[in-house]
Image (tube, grey):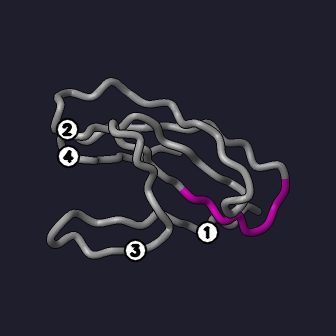
Amino acid sequence: MQGFAFAGSRGIHQMDISTHGGESWAAAILAPPLSRHSWVMWSYPWKPQRPGDHRILARATDGTGKQQSMREHPPFPDGASGMQEVIVSVV
């Protein structure tokens, strides 16, 4: 799986992925940013161990060490927050 993360001039220090609904976390692979103010592409190799629904979460840690929270917040005035969450059905 892959995605993009952005934290303005703070940059992205780390991306963590949970394939167990937040019970455990693993570091994703970050591509080098194109600039100090660019989105950062991340990837995470995943092979499901069982069929069924899987709750997948992604959280970012910015360059100041601040980790993204579960709490959603609209973008204005200080930027959006809240982790990305998807449910994947494996057959």
Mark 2 crowd level (few <14, some 14–19, many ≥20, 10 Å Cα): some
Disc 3 and disc 4 in contact, CB within 8 angstroms:
no
Q: How many other residues sit within 10 Å of disc 1, few (<14), some (14-19) or many (≥20)?
A: few
Q: Which residue is mark 4?
A: 8
Q: Is residue 23 left or right of residue 41?
A: right
Residue at image location 82% in from the left, 61% down from the top = 51
The Cα–Cα distance between marks 1 and 3, rounded to whole angstroms, is 18 Å
Foreground tag (1 vs 3): 3
- Residue shown at 50%/30% (left/top)? 29
Please identify, in this view, whether the residue under mark 4 or under mark 2 is nearer the observer: 4
Q: Which mark is residue 72?
A: 3
Which badge, 1 or 4, is on the more N-terminal residue?
A: 4
Q: Which residue is mark 2?
A: 38
Name the disc covering residue 87, or none: 1
Q: Which is closer to the viewer, label 1 or label 2?
A: 2
In what element is the residue under mark 2? loop
Q: Indicate the position of residue 66 as horizontal and vertical percent values.
A: 40, 48
Span highlighted in magenta in the image: 50-57
